Amino acid sequence: MALSLATGSAQSSNCSTQTPLYPATGSYAFAKDDPGEAIMSNTAGALDQPNTVRYAVSNVADVFKNASLSPSAGQRVDGLSILVQVNEVWKIDDAADSLAPIYFPASAHMVLKVPNDALVTSSVLSSLVLRLVGAPFRNGTDTLAVAYNPLLHSICRF
């Protein structure tokens, strides 16, 4: 039994150079390109395994709402919400299984909610994203499989 991913050019990434997984050229094309939202679709992937990546940016009236702190006097409270979302269909194909192929929906998304302030730079956001992605790792030697295994088994306390 094998799990196949029809992710086209998004099959690998060199994290040390932060290679983009979903380039705007090649096998991904814009299915939607509106102000504030763009969706790219894999045009070279298997038709029974669609996959997309969505980018969206929207204004936030008050980034301090539901936060555990209040703004300082004169501080701006408006901000941005930045969304990156990946939607895929995974396929399990087993010749010995009469029910095959079996399909699984899979998705992942990241939302950054940040204030509109000159001190919030792409470098600051990059550090935040790296901390987010690294959060499941218990030590510096875990692989992705080891890091996510406890969460996959509903174990939140490491």
Image (cartoon, helix red, strand yellow):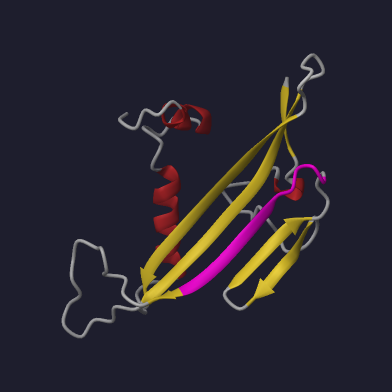
Q: Residue 78 at what x, y percent from top left?
A: 34, 78
User: Which residue lies most toward the bottom here?
Assistant: 74
Q: Is residue 145 left or right of 60 when viewed as pictured?
A: right
Q: Residue 10 at what x, y percent from top left?
A: 70, 48
Q: Nearer the viewer, residue 59 or 122?
A: 59
Q: Name the quadrant containing residue 59.
A: bottom left
Which residue sits at x=41%, y=57%?
127
Is residue 48 a member of the stretch shown in magenta? yes
Which residue sits at x=31%, y=71%?
63
Q: Residue 100 at what x, y percent from top left?
A: 77, 24
Is residue 77 a member of the stretch shown in magenta? no
Q: Which residues are magenta?
A: 47-58
Q: Name the quadrant containing residue 102.
A: top right
Asked whether the viewer can see residue 142, the reply is no
Viewport quadrant of the N terminus: top right
Which residue sits at x=79%, y=14%?
96
Asked whether the viewer can see residue 78, the reply is yes
Q: Is residue 151 left or right of 75 when viewed as pictured?
A: right
Viewport quadrant of the C terminus: top left
Which residue sits at x=39%, y=57%?
128
Q: Is residue 71 left or right of 1 when viewed as pictured?
A: left
Q: Nearer the viewer, residue 148 or 89?
A: 89
